[in-house]
Structures are given as structure tokens and as C-alpha cells.
Amino acid sequence: MKRIIALGLTLTGLAAAQAGLFLKMGAGGREIGMGEAVSAVTQGPSSVFWNPAGLAFGRAFGAFAQHAEHFQGIRYDNLALAKSFGFGTLALYGGGLYVGGFEGRTGPSPLPEWNFSCFDFYTGLAYAKRIGDFSLGASAKFFTSKIDKDAASAFAGDMGLLYATRFVNAGLALQNIGGELTYLEESSPLPTALRLGLGFKPLEFAVISADFVKPFHSSEYSRGYEIRFGSEVTIARILSLRAGLSTDLEGEYPSEEFDYGTLSAFYFGSGVRVEDFDVDYAFRSYDALGYAHRISLTYSPGRSKQVDLKASERLAEEYRKKARITAESFYTQAMNYYSEGNLAEAIANLDRALVWDPEYAEAQAMYDKIKEEKRKADAEAYYNRGLELYNQGNFMDAVTQFERCLELDPENSLARKWQENSFAALVEIQKAKYGKKQEKGQEVSELMKKGVSFYSKGDYSKAEAKFKEVLALDPQNAEAKDYLTKSEKARKDKAADYIRKAEAAKAKGDYAKAIDAYQKALEYEPGNPDANKGLANAKAEAARLASEHLAQGKALYKKGDLSGAEEEFRAALALDPSLTEPSSYLSEIAERRKSESRQAPDSKTVEELYLRGVDAYVKEDYEGAIYYWEKVLELDPDHTKAKANLAKARKKIGG
């Protein structure tokens, strides 16, 4: 005997007229609170219930759970897990609706013959891939429904497209594409629908959205189309207030017995953000049918440790403005020097402009132009001076000038010819002096030639050694004595020049640079008393300052100021490389940064390190610039400006 089941109004709406109707109910306290107008603004794991493309704009991992207490005792629950991989984002999700307490009869009877319940359940897998500001998504799900002892099942799928920028979003979703669900030999299509949405973010803390929804299968439960509107305002990045409006009051649970009131057109909601958790609530009245309440929880690990996307964009924009203003200032200075004919200072200032803004095309063009002009001018000056010295018979210094010319202009055949002539003249002088003693003359000539070559390259110690070998063979060789004197003077002048640089650095408090300059002075003149005394004093003062920087670094490290501590530890090491504590702390800081960057690089930390590198470069601390830019690339391997500037800094020190 065919059973006659008294389902009541609610169950009739759920199952009898259109199968899988609960698939239209969606999920998420935020989304429902915004009137379900979210196909363009949904993101993270809950987006699988609206537009799967939104998965690609979520965080690396996310979890979502929802419980809904619908009218007439209907309960609805949802879960979703999402994880990003190199090839895209995957999500596993599901949902279930349950309602009980129904009475079953096979004929007229004052009492029910049995009680029963019904439930709907589905589970699915979704995938999304982001390409710039766009993302594509798709999902497949298995759906089953049971009313008392009768059951039916079907497969369905969703597809979506999302375009998201800072101010405007657009979304398209095709939902519940699939077959039919058959109960008792009667089939009904799934609620397939097309959603088109727009989202606007006129302010950092406000969202306005709209959705146009067009059902594919018309029935008394799908009246043509729906237009939905939503809004969200977030206060202090913690509390969100939401409201939505629907133009379709009869699309979900229509009945001629109920007169829907004005309130049933509205949705309301709120949300609270606590570190990595979002707790969202939504409310809607169905007038005489009752009220619907939803609460959802979203977990996004690591979010509390990161600067949010909008703050990162704002930080990047502020940096771009500062970088361009500073670069333009250096560019202006460079042009002033250029107009005065000071090519060296013009190039130096253009170099600083390009460190601040490597994409400054005008500065790059002028840098290349002026550098080429200076190269040609310097090469010509060395060539002309070489000719002048050659004509004076000063062949050794002529060789030096031609050597410098060829370093700047290797293709200069005239400079190479005159350099060879200068060497030949030196050899001829020695040959003529020794007359028949050709063997001795040849040996002396070769030694003189090597000595002059070392001298021309600035390697004065080796040059002097060769000239002394000549004098060992011929103590009266006037040319060797003269060249030895010149080389010794050039070496002492070089030492004196480094001592002056050391004193200037010490006066500015830059003891690391002073120590380096004193040590170079002693390389040229090991016994120089001024260099030895200055070096000892500079090292003593550097040790004192290094101790202060170390103490300050420890204090900042305890406070959690890693960038500040890092700068202090580096300063301590620069002053006293023998210290071990700063190196240990720097290693710990590097490990902490690497650990944090495995989730996502902190944009603020990356830009702080990058700017420290820029500052070091402008101060000609190229080792420091290299250190900071290498740290930037450890955190953000795609930082193009750090890559470009790191290459420049390494070139400066010959690395």
C-alpha cells in the first residue's frame, strides 16, 4: 500500500517541490549577514559555498565551521578545510541539514502511526588557482537526501571566476550544476543558478556588495531572479557590523498561507576578530515561520603575526613615494654637478638616486650617459699626459699613464702603441748603457720593465723589489735609483693619503672606517709611526663603542625589536670583529626570521631591512648594504629591487 506521508509545510518546502533546495542556503555568518550578496567578496574556506574561486584569495591554510538554527526546528551545519599549494588551493567541505518530529500515517487517523525525520547531506572537493588579480575555481560534490525510509542521491558541481583589486571586486559563479534527485519515481532538478556579483571597498573598513541571481529551472520555488545587496563596516579591525537586503521574499519557502512582513527582506549580522579567529553571527526573520540564527567560526593561522594586506599595500605605497622623492632630490643634485662639469659627483648622486628607485628610467639614462662621458674624458686625459711624459723622456711615468688609459679604453690602439714605445725606450736606454755586455743589459732591461709595470699598476712594493734587483746588478744605475725613489715616494704618499682618510673618519666617529684606513696605510708603509699610533687609539675607542652597541642590542632583542637589535649587533661587529656574542645573536635573529617567513614574509620587516640596506649604500657602507639585502632576499626571494641593488653593491667591492 502506498504510504501517505503528512510532511507539513516545512518539509514540503524542503523536499517535495524541488530536490536539494537546502543547497541554496549557503554558509557563513559573514556571508549571510551581508544578505548573501557575496559572490564577489567571499574568500577563504567558506567561499566553497558561494564561489569556489574565492579560495585562491584566502590564506595559506584555513578552517571553517558553521551551525544554523533555522525556523521550525531545522538545523544546518557546515565544515570546510582549505590549504594552498604551489599548484593552487584545495578545499574539502561538506554540509548537512536535519529536521525531525514528523508524523506518518497511511490513512486518516487522529494519532500518528509512526514518527520520522529527514536529512540532507553533501560533501565535496574544490580547487582554485590565482593568476594575478584573477582566480578560477571549481568544485564537485556528492549529495544525498533521505525522508523517512526513502532516499535519493546525485552529483553536482560549481564553477567560479573572481577578479579582486584594492577597491573593486567582480565575481561570477555557476552553482549546483548536476542531475536530478528522484523520490518515489518523481524527479526534480537541483537548484542550479548563475550568480553575478560586484563588490566595492570605498574605504579601508567598509564593503558594499550586490548580487544578481538567476535560477536555471523555474518552479514555484524559483521566481525568475533575485537581486541582493550587502554591506559591512569594520571598527578597529576587530568588530564588524553587517546588513543585507533581498528582493526575493518568496524564493525560499513560499506559501499562500503566510504574508511576509517587511523585516523578512532584511539580513543582519556581526563579527568579532580575535587574533587568528573570526566569530560571525547572522540573523533573519521569516515572519510567521520564525527566525533563523547562524554562527560560524573561521580559523586562519598566522594572521595575527602578519601585517594585513591593506596595511602592506599602504606601507608599499608610502615607501614608493618616499623613494621617488629622495631619488629625485639626488637627481637634481646630480644635474647641478653636471652643469658645473663635475662628472664624478654627478655620477655619485645618480648612483644614489638609482639605489632609492632602481626603476627611475631618466636617472638611469643620465647615469649611463655621464659615466660614458667621464670614461672618455679620463681616458683622453691619461693619454695626453702619457704623451707629454714620453716627450719629456720620463718613460716610466708615461707607461703608467698609458696603462690607466687602457684600463678605461682597452680598444685604444694609440695608447697601446705608445705604451709599447715607452717600454721599448726604457729597454733601449739600458742596452745602450751596457754596450757589449749584452747579457747583463738584457737582464737589467727585463727587471726594469717588470718594475715599471708593477709601478704603473700601483704595486709599489713589488716595483721597488725589481729596482733593487737592478741596483744589485749595477749599483750606479741612475734610472733604477730614480725610479726607486719615485716608487718609494708614491708608496709613502699613498700611506699618508690613507692616514688623512683615517683621521677624517675618526673625527666623524666612524672608527670602523678609520681602523680600515690605518691598516691600509700600514700596508703601504709598515713602520709609519702616525699610522701605528692612530690605529691603536682607534681600536681602543672602537672596543669601547662596540661594548655599548652590544649592550644596546641585547636590550632591544629582549624587547622583541629584532631590526633595531640587528643594527646594534652589526655595529658592534664592525667595530670589533673579534666579538662572538653579536654573531650568535645575529644567527638567532636570522633563524627567527626564516621560521616566520615559512608562513608568509612580514612586509614591514622586509621593507625595514631593504631601507637599512639603502641607507648603508648611500653612506658607502657596501658590506652593510649587502648584508641587509641578502636578508631581504631570504625573506622575499622575489624582491626585485633588492636583487638589482645587491648586484650593484657587490660590484662596488669587487665581489
Image (tube, helix red, strand yellow):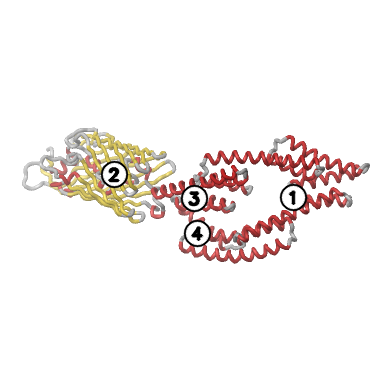
Q: Is residue 574 visible?
A: yes
- Residue assigned mark 1: 459
- 586 shown above or below 266: below
Residue projecting furthest to the top:
217
Q: Secondary structure beneath disc 4?
A: helix
**Residue type at tag 3:** Leu
| C-alpha gap between disc 3 and disc 4 | 17 Å
Q: Which mark is residue 562?
A: none
Q: Position of residue 628 (x, y in %)?
A: 54, 52
- Residue assigned mark 2: 208
| C-alpha gap between disc 4 and disc 2 | 41 Å
| C-alpha gap between disc 3 and disc 2 | 35 Å
- Mark 3 / mark 4, whichever is N-terminal: 4
- Mark 4 / mark 2, whichever is N-terminal: 2
* Mark 4 and mark 2 residues within 8 Å of each other at the beta carbon: no
| C-alpha gap between disc 1 and disc 4 | 42 Å
Q: Nearer the viewer, residue 76 or 173?
A: 173
